[in-house]
Image (cartoon, helix red, strand yellow):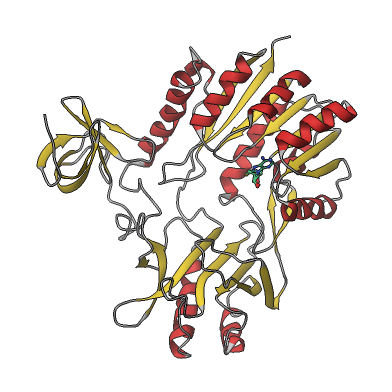
């Protein structure tokens, strides 16, 4: 069958793709269809037809799947944030568990992996779970200030202050700022012309402490009438830090390097379990604190520490996992490429009175081999938590040579996890357990933690 652009046809959705899009097959030709879920019968329009696959758009849901639910959020479909709100949470979890299993089998070549997989850990209440948000600010056709999230794959803002996966307090903060900008005629930033002042509103909330941070990202360094905004914002219970971040570059990067505190503290404090962290507008910090605790507890359980172990935590960020491990290990070494993150990590170690942690700035694939060759460093356990692209092969080789008893692999991309596990398993390790944790409900993102044992 030859499909072309603008063709209209009716299909049954058979599967969900890696981004959470529905997949239908017409005589073996796969069509990717956003906003459709398995067992939906939908009328679609072909929007792009390539040689071996195509893209379609839902024109009409003819018969909804029994797993389809009404999204809570009225703008869920337009907004680029949630891609799966129209799919029951139970089914979202099943999809994520399967996604990991399929990657481990197909890419990792791990036969019988299903038996090693523990049931996915989802959230009891998968709503209002994020502690960090960055809302772009703009103007609508009538010149009114709007803020919310971008529509999928664009930079047009869907005006919405009540996001169902963000901390609830954001609505109050955003409404206040919108009103203030309108009242004092402060212009939002315009990307095309590089004119205007206010680019983004960044908020962070400490879920344990209740402390709130608001940071306005400006194409400049001064917010006119800032005192009037501060006066209003500090009426919010828990307000702890109000600042400006200056970003005058023509860039997609949200934050610039310079932060000026306008009111209160430079940082807010939060806890994961018993460990305390100080967070600045620029710090990397896990965005779902409830599930981060679940994930780290699992990583700690897999590490099986008794207090005598030397542990390496590679890709350690601000040392969140390192400090969690340090509660139970003799010595922890953290490695991270971003110097500012390591500064935070050192501060956090001090804040918690932990003196059994040491941090290195650099690439994990440079630092570990160097330390191993020069100083013959040793590890009972190695923990890795790389970005989506996974671990460098040089690093995997060094790990294998060092022969730690256990490797705990924390991953945000099952495809690269599977690729790396294949290498480790071909070199003396075996997968003992796999745990998928849902950190990002209503999106297609999956987080996995995996325990590997040295066979010797
Ligand atoms: N473990 C941390 C952060 C994980 S995110 C936590 O749970 O909070 C991955 C981290 O790896 C980021 O902080 C990123 O800056 C860092 N990173 C990326 N490439 C790296 C490399 N080659 N070597 C070391 N760290 C790297």
Quadrant assignment, res 324:
top right
Percent x, y of residue 157: 37, 67
Where, quadrant-wise, is the N terminus in this rendering?
A: top left
Residue 98 coordinates in the image, percent (x, y)? 41, 27
Q: Residue at x 48, y 12 (%)?
A: 112
Q: Nearer the viewer, residue 130 or 150?
A: 150
Q: Measuring 51% from the left and 35% from the top, which residue is drawn there?
A: 413
- Between 129 and 344, the residue placed more toward the observer is 344
Q: Where in the figure is residue 213, as x and y percent of width and height?
A: 62, 68
**Is residue 403 visible to us here?**
no
Q: Quick check: which quadrant has ligand 1? A: top right
The reply to whether residue 182 is visible in this rendering is yes
* Left or right: 96 as drawn, with respect to 432: left
Q: How many marks are shown on the rendered structure?
A: 0
Is 226 displayed left or right of 97 in the figure? Answer: right
Residue 28: horizontal and vertical position, in percent?
20, 25
**Residue 132 is drawn in which quadrant?**
bottom right
């Amino acid at each position: 069958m030859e499909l072309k652009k603008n063709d209209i046809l009716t299909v049954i959705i058979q599967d969900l793709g890696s981004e959470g899009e529905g997949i239908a097959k017409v005589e073996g030709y796969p069509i990717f269809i956003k906003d459709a879920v398995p067992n939906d019968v939908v009328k679609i329009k072909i929007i792009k037809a390539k040689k071996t696959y195509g893209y379609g758009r839902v024109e009409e849901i003819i018969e909804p799947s029994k797993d389809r639910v009404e999204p809570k959020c009225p703008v869920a479909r337009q907004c680029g944030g949630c891609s799966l709100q129209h799919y029951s949470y139970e089914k979202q979890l099943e999809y994520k568990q399967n996604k990991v299993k399929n990657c481990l089998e197909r890419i990792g070549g791990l036969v019988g992996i299903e038996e090693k997989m523990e049931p996915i850990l989802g959230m009891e209440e998968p709503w209002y779970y994020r502690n960090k948000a960055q809302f772009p600010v703009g103007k609508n056709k009538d010149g009114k200030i709007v803020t919310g999230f971008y529509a999928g794959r664009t930079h047009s803002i869907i005006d919405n202050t009540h996001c169902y996966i963000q901390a609830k307090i954001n609505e109050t903060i955003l409404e206040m700022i919108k009103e203030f900008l309108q009242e004092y005629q402060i212009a939002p930033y315009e990307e095309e012309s590089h004119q205007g002042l206010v680019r983004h509103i960044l908020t962070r909330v400490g879920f344990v402490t209740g402390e709130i941070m608001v940071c306005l990202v400006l194409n400049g360094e001064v917010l006119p009438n800032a005192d009037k905004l501060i006066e209003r914002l500090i009426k919010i219970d828990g307000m702890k830090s109000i600042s400006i971040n200056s970003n005058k570059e023509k860039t997609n990067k949200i934050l610039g390097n310079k932060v000026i505190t306008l009111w209160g503290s430079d940082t807010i404090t939060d806890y994961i379990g018993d460990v305390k962290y100080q967070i600045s507008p620029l710090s990397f910090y896990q965005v779902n604190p409830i599930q981060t605790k679940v994930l780290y507890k699992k990583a700690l359980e897999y590490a099986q520490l008794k207090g005598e172990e030397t542990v390496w935590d590679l890709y350690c960020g601000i040392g969140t996992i390192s400090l969690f491990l340090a509660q139970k290990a003799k010595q922890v070494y953290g490695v991270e490429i971003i110097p500012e993150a390591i500064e935070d990590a050192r501060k956090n170690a001090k804040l918690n009175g932990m003196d059994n942690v040491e941090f290195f700035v650099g690439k994990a694939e440079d630092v570990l081999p160097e330390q191993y060759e020069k100083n013959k460093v040793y590890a009972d356990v190695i923990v890795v938590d790389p970005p989506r692209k996974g671990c460098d092969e040089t690093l995997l080789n060094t790990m294998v040579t060092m022969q730690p008893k256990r490797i705990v692999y924390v991953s945000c991309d099952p495809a690269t996890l599977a690729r790396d596990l294949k290498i480790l398993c071909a070199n003396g390790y075996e997968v003992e357990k796999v745990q998928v944790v849902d950190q990002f409900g209503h999106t297609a993102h999956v987080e996995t933690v995996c325990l590997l044992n040295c066979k010797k």
